[in-house]
Amino acid sequence: MAKKEFAHLMKTMVVQSPPKGLYPEPRVWMEGKDMEGFNAHFSYGFIKKPVTLHPLEGMLVHPYDECLVFEGTDTKSILNLGAEVSVELGEEREEHTFKDPSVILVPKGLPHGPVTVKKLDRTIVHYSIGLAAAYKATAIAKPSRAAKTKGSKYSHLIKKMVTAVDPRADSSGMGYSSVIGRDGVMRPAEFGVGPGNGDQIVWLYGKDLEGFDVNFTWGFYSRCGKWHRGGEAHTHPEAEILCFLSLDPDHLEALGAELELGMGKDYERHIFNKPTVAICPAGFPHLPLITRWCDKPYGFIVVCLSGEHASPWVEA
């Protein structure tokens, strides 16, 4: 079999122990060195019981912006978290609690943590995006202040995971604006973007994320077929990763589906059936994307290193 030119851009997700003191158990952990120099790091895993994490004790400070995302696993309703989560922010240890799928925005230099998952109706997903190639943190012992505080100084850093896009506009060029419901959920498969596309998706952009230089998604997928009817390949001005992930809390390494992705101007085909990350450098043509078979729903996340998401179709 001939060696494929872009095989180095397709990586099986690595499940490993995260940095010491950050999480209580192994999870998907990928840094820039694992993703051909992509200028961010990514982690993904499940939370099955009440727990303290990020960090296990004390607080952390990072020299980069970070997103800590908490999502449910109810594939019938992407807006159902099924848990109660709290986080301490700032030297004040200002505590914020949420019960909806949410992202905690951590600007560089802000002391934060720990995160406490207080109640669980069902297993939830937690993924993180750090906007630097390598994980770095300075640990801070628990402040001398005896108690957590209440307040609203940092309330703007907790965002509900819903799509807040003007339905009259479509900056991507892919026609997604027409599939956003009033509930902030995108349903592209249902509305004809492509038969293999998402059942339910939420997508947040820089303007939703206090100006962070990133946009990202979370979605449930369970259907077979081509993801996009509108064209074959597209590009982005900035680098992005496409993350195909398990929704099985007991088998983080099992995707439950098989997909085919075109990479490069000649649509070089790559087929995979394990949790995988596809790395797409800036200006790199990719797609079409086809779900060949699907035994159970799986998760999909786009992480693009820009506050916007231009996706023009190209003649490959």
Image: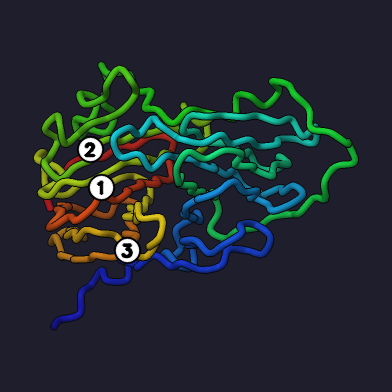
**Residue with the most extreme bottom position:** 1
Residue 18 spot, x, y in % from top left: 58, 63
**Kind of residue at disc 2:** Asp
Query: Secondary structure under badge 2?
Result: loop
Residue 284 vs residue 288: left or right?
right
Please tell me which residue is depicted at 61% across the width and 57% down the height of the picture: 23
- Measured along the vertical axis of the image, is residue 103 above or below residue 46? above
Q: Residue at x 63, y 24 (%)?
A: 155
Callout 2 crowding tier (Cα within 10 Å): few <14, some 14–19, many ≥20? many
Quarter occupied by residue 190: top left
Q: Which residue is mark 3?
A: 254
Q: Secondary structure at mark 1?
A: loop
Residue beneath disc 1: 235
Q: Is residue 209 visible?
A: yes
Please identify the quarter of the rendering in which residue 105 is found.
Answer: top right
Q: Is residue 171 above or below residue 51?
A: above
Q: Residue 217 in the image: x percent, y percent? A: 37, 40
Percent of width and height locating residue 288:
15, 52
Q: Which residue is mark 2?
A: 199
Nearest to N terminus: mark 1 or mark 3? 1
Q: How many residues crowd mark 3 within 10 Å: few (<14), some (14–19), many (20+)?
A: some
Instruction: Answer with mark 2 or mark 1, whichever residue precedes in sequence.
Output: 2
Instruction: Residue lying at the far front in this picture: please name it.
Output: 121
Residue 78 is situated, as x and y percent measured from the top left of the image, at 35, 34
In three-dimensional space, the C-alpha distance between marks 2 and 1, rounded to whole angstroms, equals 23 Å
